[in-house]
Amino acid sequence: MINQILLKKELLKKNIFKIIKIDPNVTSVTFVGSFITNNRINFISDIDVVVIVKKLDKKVFDKINNKIKKIKPGKIGLTGYKIKINNTFGPLKYKSDTDIVIHLMIYDKNGHIDHVIKSPFTCYDWERSLVFNGKRLRDTFPVGVIQFRDFLETRRSLQNYLKDLKKSVLTYYQYSFYKNKYKFIKKQKLLFDSHLAEYIFHIHKNLINNYYKYLFNKNVSLNDNYIFYLKKIIGKELYYKFIKHFKLFYNYKKTSKLNFRPKKETARLNSFLSNFNKLIKKNIKTSNKIIFYRHAKTLLNNGSFLGIGRDPGILSENINNLKDNNTYRYDIFYSSLLKRSIDTAKLIFKQKKIIQLKELNEINYGLAEGLNFSELKKKYPKLVKKLFSGDDPKFPRGESYNNVLSRVDHFIYKILKYKIKNKKQKVIGVVSHNVFLRCLVGSYFKIDKANWYKIYIPHLCPLEFIFHKNKIRPNIPRNILRIIFSKL
């Protein structure tokens, strides 16, 4: 019986891959959600499929939908069922005993990037899927990791959950097309008791799961036995305060039976979310911070390879660009040994002492110093070939990205050691360079090393990291990450 069910899943998957991927406008098709983990196809509420296209308009949208509608369930052993399509974005599900619901989410690249920025929790889940055709979603645009600020600033933030519960609604989005353009329309569905119970469980489990991902830096999905992880995840105080609430919804999911009291359980979850919200804000406020900057612009930031071989000063026009950096009050400041870094540090940290460290220096480009890319390709074709093949070669008589990463790791080790001894230092400032910061961001956001050279680090843009549980973790606004990863 299991083999028959798996066969039906495989046939459905192949049908969808075949009819969508044949379209040259499609760059990626990925199955996500319960379809990739649940073998009982008849019990999957929606079959979630993410499609990325080069160009999206009403014509493309309708074309893909019409292709999916033409699938004949009888030919894959699902006699008596009909295909129904859910084109909404969000947790809205269509339940039916007679329909196979395809939750079809179609994006162009910009739409997917926007979704990653606004809904990193959802997109991070999707990146775990190995059932795809074409480009992986993380290669289209990566989430990287879950950050503390994601719990406060995104669509699935604590505040948005609280707003939904207050109104007993579920928020979702739909496309609205006009000529060759589209936009997302925000919609809300009123939740009745049975749906409200399911939604409360959804909020509760996903919040805990996302916090687990943050704490342990792992992209994993906790099963419905997640209650047994709770004490470790949220700590004893919150655990014991809300244990009845946890058990209530755990038992509901396990038995599908619940003496549900909407007002009481909504109030209980509201209380939990409010306390969780305070926990996140407190952690961000009280955690020590380390703010990294790429130095201000110089005349030699002109497309040539600028490493340690040349040592220009910064342009005077950069002073006006530092006005936005007054939000941080630094207790200590570090710089590389290079003039452009030291001058920038002095502008930010004023007249106080700057600690200079060689670990923060830019990459040594060796004999490639001063060349532009065309000249490098002509003079060192084998080096360029290795770079584009994903290797990490050393520049002639210079360093590789791995060498710079070793310096990044050594600097972080020094900072952690210093921080543990000097807990009064709340905010640490650092001015470094393009490749140093590419290696830092690339490693902490788990970007494939072959793509680190595509990471774009703007001059004078503050990159916030925080100390939490004796580790350094990124806490960079997603809108800044949109810029940093724009060339991936």
Image (cartoon, rainbow, N blue to C red):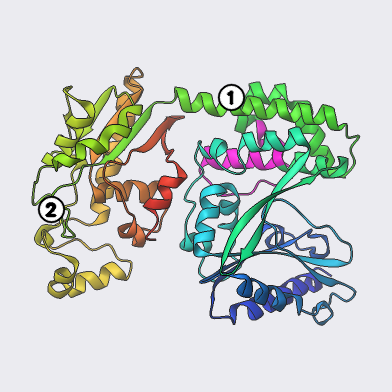
* Mark 1: few/some/many CA within 10 Å (<14, 14-19, 20+): few
Residue 434 percent across, percent down from the top left: 25, 49
Quadrant where the C terminus is found in the figure: bottom left
Give amino acid for label 2.
Leu
* Mark 2: few/some/many CA within 10 Å (<14, 14-19, 20+): some
Q: Is residue 337 above or below residue 388?
A: above
SS at mark 2 in the image:
loop
* Residue position marked by numbered label 2 in the rendering: 300
Task: Specify whether residue 333 is painted magenta.
Answer: no
Say whether residue 419 is visible: yes
Magenta span: 203-230
SS at mark 1 in the image:
helix
Residue depicted at x 26% and y 70%: 386
> Closest to the observer: 248 or 485?
485
Q: Nearer the viewer, mark 1 or mark 2?
A: 2
Give amino acid for label 1.
Lys
- Quadrant location of residue 462? top left
* Residue position marked by numbered label 1 in the rendering: 278
Residue 327 appears left or right of 228: left
Say whether residue 338 is visible: no
Residue 150 percent across, percent down from the top left: 53, 40
